[in-house]
Amino acid sequence: MPGEPVLRLTGVGAMNSPRYCPAGLLVSWRGHRVLLDGDDEAGASGRLDAWLVCDERAELMPAIRRAARALGLTAAVAAYDAAGVEIEPLPVAHTSHPTYGYLIRTARARAVWAPEFWAFPEWAAGADLMFADAAGWNRPIRFAGGVGGHADVHQVARDARDRRVGRLVFAHIGRPSIRAIDGGALPPYGEWGVDGRAYRL
């Protein structure tokens, strides 16, 4: 349909990925363009109305803030609402300080951007489309001191299927998952994200 949101993965990797650009999602519709996460290079792809982030203390934030300022924006955890699309930050369990994912809503559908989490976010249940953490492959990654970490692809796939997520796309693909991809492995539910691929909501 004309004006329906297009969600384009600007990158599918973690910050220090040996293969992929940092995970980001560009949401565009009816003349609006909002970037979720990404890096300073993702922000160079044209005009943006907002630059929203999941973690204001992430290692990439200094570069993201500079790039956002050059566009006249402030990169932050925030909501955006225009022309029939609502983008809302919601909390995720990931580390010792507040971190978020985003619920993207239209009158007809719901998408989730949650590239990093330790526990599956319950607010993502029933989403038509979800972009989810794939840092770990078949076991979770636990941060030092037990302050959180990353769920693994197998657990995320089980949780998403049990919670009736329609389409699951793995982003934030970490080294264990890259090794699995190189070995020809596929997620038990869902699909690997692809840099630059567009998804319609």
Image (tube, rainbow, N blue to C red):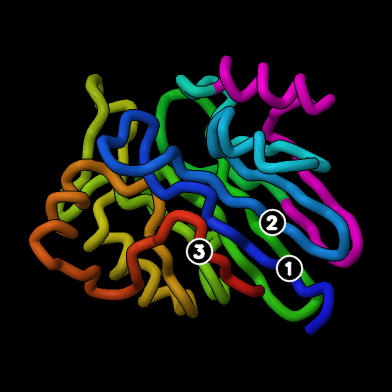
Sequence-wise first label, 2 or 3: 2
**Residue 2 screen position, x and y as percent:** 83, 79
In this rendered view, identify the residue nearer to me: 62 or 139. 62
In this rendered view, identify the residue nearer to me: 16 or 170. 16
Res 30 quadrant in image: bottom right
Farthest residue to the right: give it. 83
Residue ID for mark 2: 27
Q: Amino acid at mark 3?
A: Arg
Q: Residue at x 38, y 51 (%)?
A: 133
**Residue 196 screen position, x and y as percent:** 51, 57
Q: Amino acid at mark 2?
A: Val
The correct choice, above or below, for 27 with respect to 44 in the image is below
Q: Which mark is residue 197?
A: 3
CA separation, marks 2 and 3? 12 Å
What is the secondary structure assignment of the residue under circle 2?
Answer: strand
Which numbered disc, 3 or 1, marks the residue closer to the eye? 3
Answer whether labels 3 and 1 touch (C-beta < 8 Å).
Answer: no
Q: Residue at x 36, y 38 (%)?
A: 14
Give, as a single range, the part of the protein colored magenta.
Answer: 61-87
Of the 4 image quadrants, the one containing the C terminus is bottom right
Left or right of 146, for residue 64: right
**Residue 89 screen position, x and y as percent:** 67, 45
Question: Is residue 72 rendered magenta in the image?
Answer: yes
What is the secondary structure assignment of the residue under circle 3?
Answer: loop
The correct choice, above or below, for 186 with respect to 57 in the image is below
Sequence-wise first label, 1 or 2: 1
Residue ID for mark 1: 5
